[in-house]
């Protein structure tokens, strides 16, 4: 009998440790489960979606309107979903995706101020209401996440732009906490301030437990 495909997402503010966790988690999970896991990420994850990612993240595109940005994230998401995620789920595979709709709700909806419901609505259009089976939310204080990213970079003063960045990332976290509180059945909160090994271990245990009854 073919197993059911499972769609797992990992969310969190910048610097929460998503990339590091996935790198360590994947081989561990694949070994335990005895099957390959499709690891992918947003923004991007397919040829066209990667082009859209470049368009959005290009630092020269300072004039980009915030709703244009939200629509581009949703467009990239649709392409990635149709080309990569859904075909893998149809084949019965496990898909682990770094960021999905919750990122748009937190960043564009709340932090940029468009409104979470407005952003949810364009994403319902983009995804045909397809939601992850479950989501691991790596929770980190904004200042700790930003510090991690800047660690190792040249020593510098905390300037006005950094302050703006901090406030923006505090809003991102606020939105994630709200989402985790409203969707306890889907989202599991993980304290990402722990040592990396501990975070990986917690994610591993949660996924194995959730997959126990997979048919
Ligand atoms: N639990 C942790 N404790 C300390 N540093 C961490 C931890 N997890 C990740 N880091 C470091 O923080 C930085 C950002 O991690 P990364 O995995 O790229 O986060 P994200 O993908 O969520 O933005 C990297 O330098 C990484 O080595
Ligand atoms: C998927 C997604 C990402 N983003 C942002 C979050 C990140 O700042 C940026 C790039 O994502 P990512 O490459 O995951 O960066 P990081 O590893 O630092 O978390 O895109 C949104 O604003 N909305 C979205 O829908």
Image (tube, rainbow, N blue to C red):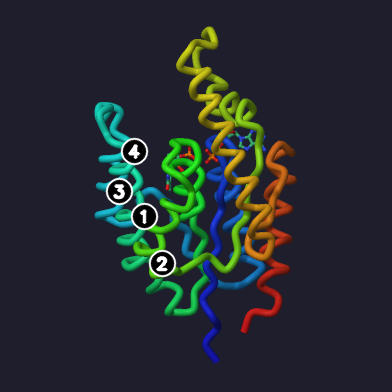
- Measure how far apart labels 4 and 2 are at the Cα level: 26 Å
Q: Which residue is mark 4?
A: 66
Q: Residues within 10 Å of mark 2 (few under 14, many from 20)?
A: many
- Secondary structure, mark 1, is loop
Say whether residue 34 is left or right of residue 199: left
Q: Say if mark 3 contacts mark 1, CB within 8 Å.
A: no
Taking the spot 61% from the left edge, 52% from the top edge, the residue there is 179
Q: Which mark is residue 45?
A: 1
Which is more foreground, mark 2 or mark 3? 3
Mark found first going from the N terminus, 3 or 1: 1
Q: Position of residue 79 (x, y in %)?
A: 30, 61
Q: Disc 4 to disc 1, how far (Cα)? A: 22 Å
According to the picture, the residue beneath numbered tag 3 turns out to be 72
Q: Quadrant of the C terminus?
A: bottom right
Q: Please indicate whether residue 106 sits to the left or right of residue 139 in the image.
A: left
Labels 1 and 2: the sequence-earlier one = 1
Residue at disc 2, secondary structure:
helix
In percent of the image, x 64 and y 28: which residue is there? 144
């Amino acid at each position: 009998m073919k197993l059911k495909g499972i769609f797992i997402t990992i969310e969190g503010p910048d610097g929460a440790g998503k990339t590091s966790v996935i790198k360590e988690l994947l081989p561990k999970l694949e070994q335990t489960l005895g099957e390959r896991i499709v690891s992918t990420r947003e923004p991007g994850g397919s040829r066209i979606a990667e082009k859209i990612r470049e368009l959005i993240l290009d630092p020269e595109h300072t004039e980009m309107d915030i709703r244009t940005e939200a629509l581009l994230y949703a467009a990239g998401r649709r392409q990635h979903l149709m080309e990569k995620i859904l075909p893998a789920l149809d084949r019965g595979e496990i898909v682990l995706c770094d960021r999905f709709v919750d990122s748009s709700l937190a960043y564009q909806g709340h932090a940029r101020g468009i409104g979470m419901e407005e952003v949810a609505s364009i994403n319902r259009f983009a995804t045909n209401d397809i939601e992850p089976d479950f989501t691991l939310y790596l929770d980190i204080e904004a200042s700790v996440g930003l510090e991690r990213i800047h660690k190792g970079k040249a020593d510098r003063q905390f300037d006005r732009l950094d302050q703006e960045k901090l406030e923006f990332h505090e809003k991102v976290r606020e939105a994630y906490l709200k989402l985790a509180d409203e969707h306890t059945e889907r989202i599991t909160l993980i304290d990402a301030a722990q040592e990396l090994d501990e975070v990986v271990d917690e994610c591993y245990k949660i996924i194995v437990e959730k997959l126990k009854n997979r048919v």
